[in-house]
Image: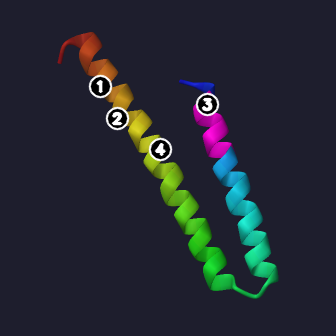
Amino acid sequence: MDIDLLFKIAGIGILVAVLNQVLTKAGREDQAMMTTITGLVIVLAIVIQEISGLFNTVRTIFKL
């Protein structure tokens, strides 16, 4: 696992948290929620790609 992956996820989390706070304070709760959901989807896509790579590595190692 690469340390860059953790920095990407942390960066996305910080960005989403800041945007969420700004939008909430501006009275745009709907857009704040959509920003949070979008950030979650992006992070899940990154994690799914990494899990896929892990499964491919396991298949290669055990010649499945």
Q: Looking at this view, name the residue that lies furthest to the left.
A: 64
Using the numbered discs, state the Cα–Cα distance from disc 2 to disc 4 in whole angstroms: 10 Å
Q: Residues within 10 Å of mark 1 (few under 14, many from 20)?
A: few
Q: Is residue 51 above or below residue 45?
A: above
State which mark lies toward you, 2 or 3.
3
Q: Marks 2 and 1: in contact by CB < 8 Å?
A: yes
State which mark lies toward you, 1 or 3.
3
Residue identified by numbered label 3: 4
Residue identified by numbered label 4: 46
Q: Marks 3 and 2: in contact by CB < 8 Å?
A: no
Q: Could you tell me which secondary element the residue under label 4 belongs to?
A: helix
Q: Amino acid at mark 2?
A: Ser
| Residue 28 in the image, given as x and y percentages of width and height | 70, 85
Using the numbered discs, state the Cα–Cα distance from disc 1 to disc 2 in whole angstroms: 6 Å
Q: Residues within 10 Å of mark 3 (few under 14, many from 20)?
A: few
Q: Is residue 50 above or below residue 41?
A: above
Residue 56's disc is 1
Residue identified by numbered label 2: 52
| Residue 50 in the image, given as x and y percentages of width and height | 43, 34
- Sequence-wise first label, 2 or 3: 3
Residues drawn in magenta: 4-10
Q: Could you tell me which secondary element the residue under label 2 belongs to?
A: helix
Using the numbered discs, state the Cα–Cα distance from disc 1 to disc 3 in whole angstroms: 20 Å
Q: Amino acid at mark 1?
A: Asn
Q: Amino acid at mark 3?
A: Asp
